[in-house]
Image: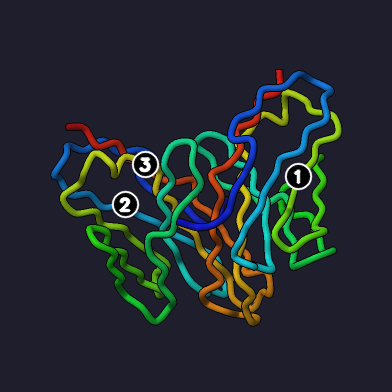
Amino acid sequence: KNQVEQSPQSLIILEGKNCTLQCNYTVSPFSNLRWYKQDTGRGPVSLTIMTFSENTKSNGRYTATLDADTKQSSLHITASQLSDSASYICVVSDRGSTLGRLYFGRGTQLTVWP
Amino acid sequence: EADIYQTPRYLVIGTGKKITLECSQTMGHDKMYWYQQDPGMELHLIHYSYGVNSTEKGDLSSESTVSRIRTEHFPLTLESARPSHTSQYLCASSAPGRMGDTYNEQFFGPGTRLTVL
């Protein structure tokens, strides 16, 4: 069973609308959680990084939240644009590893329609 | 934009051929990684390196091999390609960090889409 689960698997919204993507994880001990954006045929690009002490982090129209107690995170996208169409991947890092091992979700495929 | 490069971006090759996927980074990062990603699936770590002359196998078993002769270069080789090797291969690197470093961010290259016929 994957230690990082994302929902929904895919989402279609109209341009200008808001949306929220969900991430649940079981990785322990927890170090930090990242949201990445991956355009089709490209490598993932980091949007936000949060440690266990951070509840929310914003990057422009992207706002991530973290509840370390329930092991849940969300990514809220405001006023969506066509360029937001991509896969959004939740990535959790464990603590105490020199490698900084990452656990990847399968991503939410977001499509923004005009 | 991260300074990490992969070539080729796309490769279509016949079964049995030997291939090398190139990955280079200009950030001076010690740690480098190779991931395999199939459509709609999570990234799986297949190789990593702590630095020059260091290579380790990742979580997902792979018939590929890697080498790390120079800090900036981390090529991946398949001696005899098979259709089961068809996938996207992503290279990444990260800056040196202390154990438990909370900001061990990995920067990804654009990937190589490999198709073996």
Residue at 65% x, 30% y: name it: B114
Residue neighbourhood size for the residue with mark 3, other residues' Cα within 10 Å, grouped as few (<14), some (14–19), many (≥20):
many
Relative horizontal placement of residue A84, taking residue B4 as reference (left or right): left
User: Is mark 1 in CB contact (under 8 Å) with mark 3?
Assistant: no
Q: Position of residue B12 (x, y in %)?
A: 66, 22
- Give percent across and percent down for residue B73: 72, 55
- Eye-nearest disc, 2 or 1: 1
Q: Is residue A26 left or right of residue B24?
A: left
Q: Which residue is mark 1?
A: B76
In the drawing, does residue A32 fall left or right of residue B19? left
Q: CA distance from mark 2 to mark 3?
A: 12 Å
The quarter of the image holding the C terminus of chain B is top right
Q: Chain of mark 3?
A: A
From this viewpoint, which residue is outermost toward the front? B26
Q: Residue at x 79, y 20 (%)?
A: B15
Disc on res. A86: 3
Element on which disc 3 rests = strand
Q: Nearer the viewer, residue B114 or A109?
A: B114
Residue at mark 2 = A21
